[in-house]
Image (tube, rainbow, N blue to C red):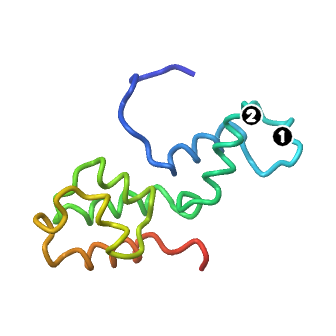
């Protein structure tokens, strides 16, 4: 594997999970068939129980596009994608100066998150 661009930026949990799957991480109980380090299996196991397990590249791209009116930073979008807040209480710590920047749009943003990233329990 050749590194094209070193430290290209932060990754979403989905991107890390997708990378681990491409390397062979799976729910194989023996874990002898894949060329994945034990620490990578631990990360894989953790991410399988997060919102990342039910996300797709398309849903993340769609969410980022629909966030443009809110003028969120890239890191704020990544945090929302990774955490998948389901209420305004959960979204407050993710966005700097939330009340001043979004005013009445907080609930709209939460609804957008719930629409684009359905709960993994469904």
**Residue 105: x percent and y percent?**
19, 76
Residue shown at the point (29%, 65%) measured from the top left: 92
What is the residue that sits farthest to the right in this orientation?
30
User: Pointers 2 and 1 in contact (CB under 8 A)?
Assistant: yes
In the picture, the quarter occupied by the C terminus is bottom right
**Residue 74: x percent and y percent?**
27, 48
Label 2 to label 1, Cα distance in Å? 9 Å
Q: Residues within 10 Å of mark 2 (few under 14, many from 20)?
A: few
Disc number for residue 15: none
Tell me the mark number nearer the camera, choosing from 2 and 1: 2
**Residue 46: x percent and y percent?**
64, 51
Task: Relative to 54, say whether 37 is above or below.
Answer: above
Residue shown at the point (50%, 59%) measured from the top left: 56
Q: Secondary structure at mark 2?
A: helix
Q: Nearer the viewer, residue 91 or 19?
A: 91
Residue shown at the point (74%, 34%) measured from the top left: 38
Q: Secondary structure at mark 1?
A: loop
Disc number for residue 38: 2
Query: Does 8 sit left or right of 44 as displayed?
Result: left
Q: Nearer the viewer, residue 67 or 91?
A: 91
Query: Does 122 sit left or right of 84 as displayed?
Result: right
What is the residue that sits farthest to the left in this orientation?
100
**Residue 43: x percent and y percent?**
64, 43
Task: Relative to 37, say whether 65 is above or below.
Answer: below
Q: Which residue is mark 1?
A: 31
In the picture, the quarter occupied by the N terminus is top right
């Amino acid at each position: 594997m050749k590194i094209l661009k070193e430290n290209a930026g932060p990754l979403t949990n989905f991107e890390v999970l997708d990378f681990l799957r491409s390397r062979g991480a799976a729910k194989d109980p023996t874990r002898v068939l894949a060329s994945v380090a034990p620490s990578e299996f631990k990360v894989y196991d953790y991410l399988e129980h997060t919102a990342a397990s039910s996300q797709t590249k398309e849903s993340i791209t769609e969410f980022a596009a629909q966030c443009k009116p809110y003028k969120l930073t890239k890191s704020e979008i990544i945090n929302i994608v990774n955490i998948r807040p389901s209420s305004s209480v959960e979204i407050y710590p993710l966005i700097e100066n939330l009340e001043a920047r979004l005013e009445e749009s907080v609930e709209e943003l939460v609804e957008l998150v719930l629409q684009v990233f359905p709960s993994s329990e469904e």
